[in-house]
Image (cartoon, rainbow, N blue to C red):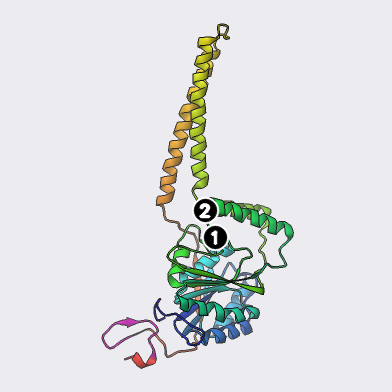
């Protein structure tokens, strides 16, 4: 790895790249890994494939172990139990060591867009995304519901989610660390922009298919949508606080109405005034207390950094390397260099 200033271009190789792949039921194809490795080796100095084994069965685990024995530059992280697919991507972003981190499925039709995406990095972009056509496997009902949810998410957070989803996502190392540590990381990897300090470009490629949908069932999809909305924005809690304040104001106005009726109407039913004042007074106090508690919870929510629960129980690394002469060494002055070129090694 040569540092974050190393920008790869279409005509010269520079920097290093980590390709993050989430493995669940089917291991990646060895031929696809080889073709992608050769394509990336022509564009980067160093390449690694980070495979996140997301609660895989025994047969897939054995296949992954065989891949690390036969192919170079592969690292496999085995998770203790299956987590959400997008959260597994965040594990890969956190453990990748390359200057650039690539999220994609190993489809040969995406290699043609890879060089164009990488070429845009020379213009100073920290995020480069390739978007194609929406997957034909999406049902019309799924597409409509997804667009409505993403519109609600944009209204709540101000962040736009790409529709259709991205086929290639290339992040600088700093961007990958920011996404992995963000409370809305699962949605950031679906967005067209990350943060103001990370310039992003979105490239459209007609004919480039998006990833197929991962159906979690109705209950699972609703739970995931609510979780992502609540973790990304404090707007629901803020709305609850405002509703409580509005209820308190209405209770106070109702108390004034009760007093007015008692003063102006001569035949008020006995006990109605005191009972109404008691109820409105309690509602006013409860609303005020709820609003204060909501504000304190909001302050705690903003002060606590997000922490995701996942356990990596096993790690495998390839014994082979495409460039075995590029190792972690110390130069003549004793300064540590990661991936130093051969001519500078002591």
Residue found farthest to the bottom: 343
Q: Position of residue 69 (x, y in %)?
A: 55, 84
Would you identify the image quadrant in which residue 293 lies?
Answer: top left
Magenta part of the chain: 330-341
Whether residue 199 is visible to the viewer of this picture, yes or no, is: yes
Q: With respect to residue 311, does 242 lie above or below?
A: above
Circle 2 packing at 10 Å, graded few (<14), some (14-19), many (20+), is: some
Residue found farthest to the front: 123
**Tag 1 near tag 2, CB within 8 Å:** yes
Q: With respect to residue 319, does 79 lie above or below?
A: above
Residue found farthest to the top: 266
Q: What residue do we see at 61% from left, 66% from top?
A: 165
| Residue at the disc numbered 2 | 157
Q: What residue do we see at 52% from left, 19% from top?
A: 257
Say what secondary structure mark 2 lies in: helix
| Residue at the disc numbered 1 | 187
**Quadrant housing the C terminus:** bottom left
Would you identify the image quadrant in which residue 215 lies?
Answer: bottom right
Name the mark nearer the viewer: 1 or 2: 2
């Amino acid at each position: 790895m040569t540092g974050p200033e190393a920008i790869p271009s279409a005509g010269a190789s520079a920097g290093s790249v980590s390709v993050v792949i989430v493995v669940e039921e089917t291991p990646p194809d060895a031929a696809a890994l080889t073709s992608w490795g050769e394509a990336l080796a022509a564009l980067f100095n160093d390449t690694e494939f980070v495979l996140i084994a997301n609660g895989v069965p025994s047969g897939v685990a054995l296949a992954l172990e065989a891949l690390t024995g036969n192919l170079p530059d592969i690292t496999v992280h085995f998770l203790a139990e299956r987590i959400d697919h997008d959260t597994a991507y965040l594990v890969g972003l956190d453990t990748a060591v390359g200057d650039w981190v690539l999220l994609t499925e190993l489809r040969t039709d995406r290699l043609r867009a890879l060089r164009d995406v990488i070429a845009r990095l020379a213009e100073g972009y920290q995020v480069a995304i390739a978007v194609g056509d929406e997957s034909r496997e999406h049902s019309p009902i799924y597409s409509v519901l997804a667009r409505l949810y993403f519109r609600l998410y944009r209204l709540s957070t101000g962040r736009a989610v790409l529709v259709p989803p991205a086929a290639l996502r290339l992040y600088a190392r700093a961007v990958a660390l920011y996404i992995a540590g963000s409370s809305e990381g699962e949605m950031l990897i679906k967005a067209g922009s990350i943060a103001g300090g990370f310039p992003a470009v979105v490239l459209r490629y007609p004919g480039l298919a998006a990833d197929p949908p991962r159906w979690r069932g109705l209950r699972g999809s609703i739970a995931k949508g609510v979780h992502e909305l609540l973790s990304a924005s404090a707007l629901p809690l803020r709305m609850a606080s405002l509703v409580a304040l509005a209820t308190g104001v209405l209770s106070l106005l109702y108390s004034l109405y009760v007093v007015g009726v008692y003063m102006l109407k001569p035949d008020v039913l006995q006990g109605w005034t005191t009972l109404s004042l008691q109820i409105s007074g309690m509602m006013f106090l409860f609303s005020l207390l709820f609003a204060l508690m909501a504000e304190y919870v909001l302050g705690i929510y903003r002060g606590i950094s997000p922490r995701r629960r996942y356990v990596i129980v096993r790690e495998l690394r390839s014994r082979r390397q495409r460039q075995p002469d590029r190792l972690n060494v110390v130069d003549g002055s004793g300064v540590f260099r990661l991936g130093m070129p051969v001519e500078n090694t002591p």
